[in-house]
Amino acid sequence: MPKRMTYAESGVDIFAEEKTVSALIGTLKTGRKGFGKALNIKGHYAGLVDFGKHALTLCTDGVGSKVIIADEMKKWDTVGIDCIAMNVNDCICVGATPVAFVDYLAMEKPNQRIAEQIGVGLNRGAKLSNISLIGGETAILPELIHGFDLAGTCLGYVEKKDIITGKKIKPGDVIVGLRSSGIHSNGLTLARKIFENRFHDRFLKSNKKIGEVLLEPTRIYVKEILDVIKKFKVHGLAHITGRGARKLLRLNKNVGYCIAAPFKPHDVFRLIQEIGNIDDKEMYQTFNMGMGFCIIASKKDADSIVKMLKGKAKVVGSVVQEKGVKIPELSITYKK
């Protein structure tokens, strides 16, 4: 039996990271007054600022260590999609429409081929999100960067009356899950440790290599979610990224979330779990496990939302009184 692997042992301790983030946020006291002031919505996926009738949203994120796999496979044309997806999927979590994006590319040394392929992915992601690429920054940092790093920032807008914070979530609401496209852009540090030196091996019985499966780009949920919130009163929206099912706790900590019918995980997750001897609880707090996004709405709207999403979603659970996140069939409970 191989040694049981964890995300922390691979180099990413999510609990230590939370303490680090809290330490940083605890020092941030200064804020603008009046027009352009920050709206007091803490701990959500995107920050909001007062813009009269509207609020502007800003969020920022990167591709993470997925870029290391892109380098290994000499395939860089999808990581731009990941970069945009990680941002626009956060932006829509407050009910906002993403409109513009800037990227930041840091490289060890100039490489036109890599930059061109990254541009291909950024263009594709922008088209899928219906946003404008309005600029960015490229830095050559040989003493800081090994390979390259790609991140970006997304601007969006929402009418103040339409902001979705999660405060309206209540017991009896239903959780609608949307299928992920694969591993997306989280948990790759652990996945890389597990598949070390095997990225060019064939993935199970497919014609793809393991590295190619890991590079499957993050699904962009913008169109579906914006269509849903135009038609239904949605109480909460969650982008399931790092920390997996724990992400639901960001929406409203005064209730609980019972995922009674989780998606069947993609084969890549099953292989990661088998090779790494990883328990279910660790898997579901590290990876999306087949569910990349959640909509929380009233029970009366749930079936109509699922129908509207045409096979891309299903009811996975409900909001309950007891706090935390539960996945009963796997005997998993996350309290915080």
Image (cartoon, rainbow, N blue to C red):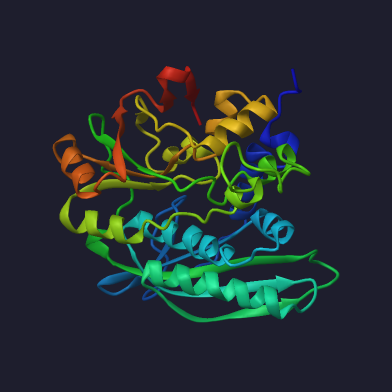
Give above or below for 62 relative to 209: below
Q: Is the N terminus in the top left, top right, bottom left or bottom right quadrant?
A: top right
In the image, residue 247 above or below residue 164: above
Q: Quadrant of residue 115?
A: bottom right
Going 30% across and 55% down the picture, which residue do you hit?
A: 225
- Quadrant in the picture for residue 280: top right
Residue for point 60% across, 66% down: 151
Residue 182 located left or right of residue 222 = right
Nearest the camera: 248 or 280? 280
Residue 65 x, y percent position in the rendering: 68, 54
> Where does residue 120 sit, x and y in percent of width and height?
54, 74
Q: In the displayed structure, does residue 76 sit left or right of residue 49?
A: right
Q: Is residue 152 visible?
A: yes
Give the residue at the far right of this rendering.
143
Tell me which residue sits at (44%, 51%) in the image.
44
Nearer the observer, 73 or 234: 73
- Quarter where residue 224 is shown: bottom left
Rendered location of residue 113, percent (x, y): 69, 77
Q: Is residue 98 left or right of residue 244?
A: left
Tell me, yes or no, if residue 49 can be seen here: no
Q: Nearer the viewer, residue 49 or 30?
A: 49
Q: Is residue 176 left or right of residue 112?
A: left
